[in-house]
Amino acid sequence: MPNHLLDSSAVNCALSPPKLFVSTVPLRDHVTDLVSLSTDSPLAWLSGKDGIVGWGEAARCRLGAEPKTVEPTDKTRFFEADRWLNGLVEQAEVEDEVNLPGTGPVAFGTFSFSPHSPGSALVVPRVLVGRRGTHMWLTTISDEPGARPEELPSTPSTSGRIGPVTWQGGTLDPQRWMDTVTGTIERIRSGELEKAVLARDAVAEADSPIDVRVLLERLRRRFPSCFTFSVDGMVGATPELLLRREGDRLTSLVLAGTRARGQDHEEDRRLGEEMLSSPKDIEEHALAVDSLRAALGPLSKELVVPDRPHLLRLANVQHLATPAQARPAPGVSALDAVAALHPTAAVGGTPTGSAMRLIAEEEGMDRGGYAGPVGWMDGAGNAEWGIALRCALVEGARARLFAGCGIVAGSDPRSELAETVSKFRVMREALTDPTAQDPFQG
């Protein structure tokens, strides 16, 4: 492979994007594990056996934190990223022999939950391998013309282990976090707001740098119906599709309302029916669906949202779920829709501004990319964006885990704490032996 494919030409979003030469070719050799092709810190978006995995860096759009004087619902970072990516695509020279979503120039993205937090970025990889059904492809992106490798790279080795992990408490211990939930319930009952989503964190320290490929493979196998992702240090398996765009169709999935899975079929059925008839969970879910309608309605020529949610059962929890479909109005991009949707009531609250201010005041931590949009876009406007849930920020040997839940007037602090424990389990089991002592309960 030419040496220039390994060099980085990252730029700030305030600067003009580089001119890139993009080649996508079909692959004759099909592999079952895309993650095994990547280097230690891959860019990845996987669902079942399909997905895209990239490595190297052809270009980067860095987005700084906005001043604290900016409203917590500010959308500037999304619009700056969209302009930058449009400029990159306009001047790129592209040869695409496959022409499917995820071919040609592709940017992986992660956006901070709050505009006041750093960490939002778009990253265009040097090399990308993708699979969609029976199709598989290789994309190379270079700042020089003519680079067209048509064979898979050799597979890097991985130990398949993370190593011993030491757990540390998060910003708030369980009791202080429950006290915060209690105070939030009081503010909701006083009429200040209807719902707020509160999160907590925890930290894992390994004895050596954490191999993200191991995390991705464990998450993909355990949660094949989720979107397993790795973008700029944010790694996880989210069940929540914020937005998918294919051609002139938008799809979204609202998740709000959670129960643990039962120990047997009868308990599992009982827990699901309990949630479907729970006024607290129905209210929480309805607020999230209303926020989606309010966000996508003005951007759509057509919007279809079912009247009632259904149950979505995952390996560790079950949710109330409502799918939505829309046709965007002319000129509306995927990032326009992402900007309108974020933060949804499922990760922020209602009303949005009041909830975002309460989170900043009471949560005691910076979420960074947790609960922010994460995903990818291609040069044709196709995209998949999820919400960064069931995830961790991985930096070297350190992983910072996050879990949250929606607080409404009928919430119970101890039940909400138990919900975060269930959600932490996704990344905890990916990082260490699932029989290890639970570090998240008081």
Image (cartoon, rainbow, N blue to C red):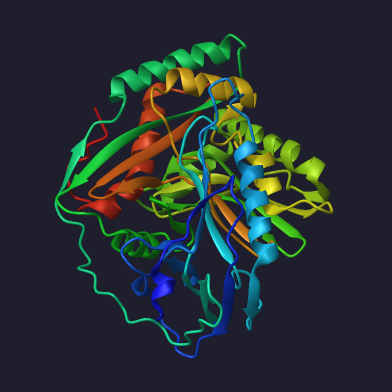
Q: How many marks?
A: 0
Figure check: 237 above or below 159: above
Taking the view exactly as shown, the residue that stands out farthest to the top is: 190
> Image quarter for residue 308?
top right
Figure check: 343 above or below 224: above
Does residue 34 appear in this view?
Answer: no
Figure check: 213 above or below 267: below
Task: Residue at 16%, 56% (x, y): give it.
Answer: 163
Q: Give the camera-side residue of 366 and 85.
A: 85
Task: Residue at 37%, 59% (x, y): give it.
Answer: 219
Q: Is residue 80 left or right of residue 233?
A: right
Residue 54: % across, % down: 45, 67
In the picture, the quarter occupied by the N terminus is bottom left
Residue 255: % across, % down: 57, 44
> Image quarter for residue 72?
top right
Q: Give the camera-side residue of 10 and 400.
A: 10
Q: Is residue 440 left or right of residue 24?
A: left
In the picture, the quarter occupied by the C terminus is top left
Task: Residue at 66%, 34% (x, y): give it.
Answer: 286
Q: Is residue 220 left or right of residue 407?
A: left
Residue 387: % across, % down: 53, 46
Q: Give the camera-side residue of 276 and 200.
A: 200
Does residue 119 appear in this view?
Answer: yes
Residue 93: % across, % down: 65, 73
